[in-house]
Structures are given as C-alpha cells and as structure tokens.
Amino acid sequence: MRMILVGPPGAGKGTQAARLVDKYGIPHISSGDMLRAAVKAGTELGVTADRYMKAGQLVPDDVVIGMILERIAAPDCAKGFMLDGFPRTIPQAEALDAAMTKAGVAIDVVLLFEVPDALIVERGVGRRNDPITGRIYHIKFDPPPAEVTERLVHRKDDHEAAINERLHYYHDWTAPIMPFYEGKGLLRRVDGVGTPDEVSARVVKALA
Ligand code: ADP
Ligand code: ADP
C-alpha cells in the first residue's frame, strides 16, 4: 500500500497516521519530522530548512524532493509507505509521480483531511509532541498524562502567526495539487472534524 496523507497544518494527519501504520505495517514518512530531525542534527539540509520552517514557509522543492525520494527508495519502503506532508506543491507531486513511474509502481490512494481554517489555529497552538514516544497530544482535545507533561515539546512554528502563514501556503500551493490526484481517481476526502476516533472510522470507510 502506497498512501499519501494531505491536509492543512494540524488537520490530524500525524494522529491518523500513527493509527494506520499499526494496521498496515508500512513506514510512516513525515517530511516535517524528517526536516525537524535534520535541523536538530545540524546538517546542511537542516540549516537551510530551519530558516523557512521557523517562519511557517515551505522549504524549497529541490531540498524536500531529494530527501523524500531517497527515503522511499530504502528497502523498508519496497512493500509500501505512508507519506505525510509530502507532496505539498505541484512540482513535488510531479517529481513523486515520475519517480514512481520509473520504479514501476504507483500511489494507491491519497487521503485528504478536510478541516475548516477556523479550527486549525486552535489545533495547532494546543499541540504538544512527546520527543520520546513520538505521541502527539493536544492540551484540550487529547490531554497528556501528568507524568509526561514535563518533557513535551511545543513546536516553535505552532504559534498563531506561523500557523496562519502555513495555512496561506496550504491554500496557495498545496490545495492546487488535489485536481492532479482527483484526475487519477486516487483522491478520497475525509471530514477531519470530530473526535480522533470518529475521523479514524471515516478513514477506514474511505479505504474500504
Ligand atoms: P504541519 O502539518 O503542522 O504543517 P509539518 O510537520 O508537516 O507540519 O511541516 C512543518 C514545516 O516543515 C512546514 O511548515 C514546512 O516549513 C516544512 N515542510 C514539511 N513538509 C514540507 C514539504 N513537503 N515541502 C516544503 N516544506 C515542507
Ligand atoms: P497534522 O499532522 O495534520 O499537522 P496532528 O495530527 O499533529 O496534525 O494534529 C494537530 C493537533 O490536533 C494535535 O494536537 C492533535 O492532538 C490534535 N488533533 C488531531 N486530531 C484531532 C481531532 N480529530 N480532534 C481534535 N483534535 C485533534
């Protein structure tokens, strides 16, 4: 299964991905997580990416495309993968398509999580990440247990200004890739409003 998860920042892609990887046993490849790891490691790629990420802007296509195409060529992706946060622009979608064609494989499904802009800021500012387990919490919608709160990370781009900037980029650059996948008959829209369990149930239906 080769799957893509798309949707605005904070739509719940990471939350749903964590549930799906257990079910499908395929690697979860989050471009944002990979970029944050590169920033933390201080690699050349990370230093470049950091400038854009802090401001809520998109990292240049060539940087992200190279990183993701290399990752999905790894042996653990031979049977499938779940891309989360990539592609985010038309050139990224085209580069992925070309790489798939060259490898003689294809994307099976694109899940689009739809959440109105009005909910996005609240989801983003309340997000907290556990650096040890990778678990995603929300201070109001999915509160963390007391014993982990100390170690939780509040991403530096999860404040209102950067979230609004990311939302602009989503509408201007990412939303236009949907017709590309719709034209191929791969796009499945999932209503992302409701509890994580309700959204999971819709995902299961969309994949059936
Ligand atoms: P969210 O889904 O909350 O927006 P991500 O973790 O997917 O967050 O991405 C965080 C940041 O990493 C983005 O704002 C952007 O700067 C960068 N990024 C992630 N994926 C891509 C991508 N495919 N293309 C360009 N930049 C990306
Ligand atoms: P994305 O990967 O799309 O950026 P996340 O999965 O990180 O989004 O979710 C963003 C925030 O919203 C997190 O704090 C998460 O706990 C919370 N969240 C995820 N799904 C839901 C939901 N269905 N209802 C309420 N909050 C949610």
Image (spheres, rainbow, N blue to C red):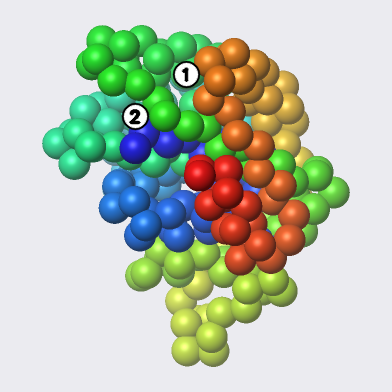
Q: Residue at x 41, y 64 (%)?
A: 134
Q: Which numbered disc covers residue 68? A: 2
Where in the figure is residue 172, as x and y percent of width and height? Answer: 72, 22
Q: Tags 2 and 1 in contact by the CB under 8 Å rule?
A: yes
- Give the vertical position of 139 relative to 102 (above or below): below
Compute the Cα span from label 2 to label 1.
10 Å
Q: Which numbered disc covers residue 197? A: none
Farthest left residue in view: 75
Q: Which SS class for mark 2? A: helix
Q: Which SS class for mark 1? A: helix
Amino acid marked by disc 1: Gln
Where in the figure is residue 165, as x and y percent of width and height? Answer: 72, 36
Q: Which numbered disc covers residue 92? A: 1
Question: Does 195 sit left or right of 147 as displayed?
Answer: right
Farthest bottom residue in view: 146
Quadrant showing the N terminus: top left
Q: Residues within 10 Å of mark 2 (few under 14, many from 20)?
A: some
Disc 1 CB within 8 Å of nearest ligand 1 atom: yes
Amino acid marked by disc 2: Ile
Q: Ligand 2 is located in which of the four quadrants?
A: bottom right
